Each structure stands twice: as structure tokens, then as C-alpha cells.
Amino acid sequence: DTLSSILEFLAEEHLTRTDCVAALGGGVTGDMAGLAAALYLRGVKYVQLPTTLLSAVDSSVGGKTAIDLKAGKNLAGAFLQPSAVICDTNCLETLPPEVSADGAAEAIKTAVLSDAGLFNAIEDGMFMMTDTAAIIAHCVQYKAGVVERDEKEQGERKLLNLGHTVGHAIEKCSDFTIPHGHAVAAGLAIMTRAAENLGWMTGESKRTLEAERIESAVETLGLPSATKYPPAALAQAALSDKKRAGDSITIVVPSKIGRCELKTIPVMELQSIIEAGWALE
């Protein structure tokens, strides 16, 4: 309904293909305005102006726009790269702690994917005490590089879904009452524990080191590392995940801090993998 009203507004205001849509707000605002821009007149330019940490470090960059359907998260959308992304970090000073934590979840994800040094800074409690702009820039630089190499998510970009298969399932099970960052944090912790328990973390990456550190960092930032929704419900919810292809689904598995791998598994195995990392909230 909101998307429809935006499109009607653009038409009533007689926007043309030489005009521009500005998305001022968080991730939902960016997705909604971006999708409207992608659809109106078969595509007009838009600019992202993120005002939350989550949208600044992640959702404003990469050109993914979408809305949720009853069946699942982000199932109706389009790829449309913004003409610019402008982030005023002063806006972040007005955020309540729980909203800042949502963004921190995506920053942790980026660190686990790509940079042990960034993870060390987050782990040491320096995340919001140091140069926030530098941390945002680090996350954006990494994601932008991945998107440039794989814009339509045919390979490498799938890594950015670390924690999201279970995270999106948690969101759906909660009827989207659990914020995205909180759900992704729990999804990351569950997948990390599963990787350790299934032997996908080896050598120096055993639980006493890497897996335990990831779980601890999530909890230190006030994010959940577990969920009340049982593995069967999460696996069922994940059947609508965009990363599913027929009877298989691609999951992102941490092998150590700073390196993750893609594993394509039969859908029927997902529940047992979730069970291997599940813990009651």
C-alpha cells in the first residue's frame, strides 16, 4: 500500500525521467523509495540519504530495492543503483541504542566476512567510541567492491547474506516485529555455532577462539545470539528465501574471522544445520 501511494504521488507531481527521488531515512525508506524509483516510468534516478547506522553501513549501498510479501522478506524488488549515497554521520547521534545496535549487527557481519582488524575494533568495544565515519567507510568500501564484481548476486555477492537465511526466517516468524539487525545477529550466531559443531571451523577456528568471540561480540553490543523460534519453524520460513534454487539453498558459513564460504545444500538439510547451532533465547 505504501509503495502504491508513493507511485501515485510521483505521478500526481508529474515527475519526469530527468527528475530524482531522494530516500531520506533508514533501510525501509531506502528500499521503498528505491523500488518506487525503479518502477516509475520504468526507472528514474534516486539518491540515498541514510540516517541510521544500518542503512549507512549496508542497505543504502548496492542497489537492492524491495518490499516484503506475506510469504517472506524482500520478495518483490528490483536492482537499481543509486546515483549517489550521502551519509551525514551527525544523524546517527540521535539514534536510540537499540537502533544503533541494528547497524552494529551488519558491521559485525562485514568484519566476519572480510576483516579481522575491524572485528578486533568492534570486539574491543571501540565501535561507537572511535571514528564512526571511518567504520562506515570501511563497510561501504568492502560492499561496493563485492557489488561491482557481482551486481546481480550470481556468486560472490551471496556472501553478503551471512546470517541472513536464518535472520530473515526469524523476522518472518516474528511477523516482522523483530528488527532486521537483531534477527541477523541471531542468525550469525546460530550459523557460527553450527559451523563449529559440524566441524566446518577447523584449526585455530575452534570454538574457544573464533566462534566464541563472534557470539561474545554480538552479545556485548546488546544483540541477541539466540532465538525462541524452533529450528523446524525457522527452516520452514526459509523455504521462501531468495537464495533458494529448486530443492537447494546456498548458505554462508564462517570458517574463521575474516573468511567465509558458500555452501549449497539440499533444502531438507537446513533444519539439521540450524539445530546444530540453535540455542534458546
Image: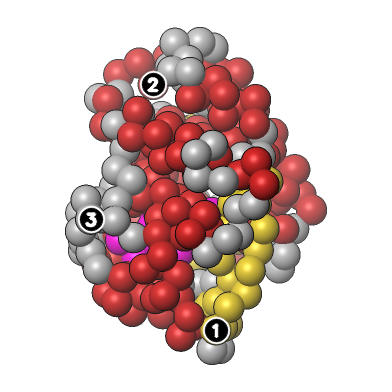
On screen, residue 228 versus residue 46, left or right, reads: left
On screen, residue 177 versus residue 104, left or right, reads: left
What amino acid type is highlighted by mark number 2?
Leu
Q: Secondary structure at mark 2?
A: helix
User: Is residue 270 part of the magenta span, yes or no?
Assistant: no
Residue named by callout 3: 280
User: Please, is residue 266 above or below residue 141 in the view?
Assistant: below
Name the residue located 27 percent from the left edge and 74 percent from the top edge. 233
Q: Earlier in the sequence, mark 2 or mark 1?
A: 2
User: Please, is residue 84 above or below residue 8 in the view?
Assistant: above
User: Is residue 169 part of the magenta span, yes or no?
Assistant: yes
Crowd band around label 1 with a 10 angstrom C-alpha radius: few (<14), some (14–19), many (20+): some
In this rendered view, identify the residue nearer to me: 75 or 272.
Answer: 272
Name the residue located 46 percent from the left edge and 85 percent from the top edge. 268
Q: Which residues are the magenta region?
A: 162-170
Q: Earlier in the sequence, mark 3 or mark 1?
A: 1
Residue named by callout 2: 92
In this rendered view, identify the residue nearer to me: 43 or 13.
Answer: 43
- Residue 106 in the image: state x and y as whole percent: 48, 40
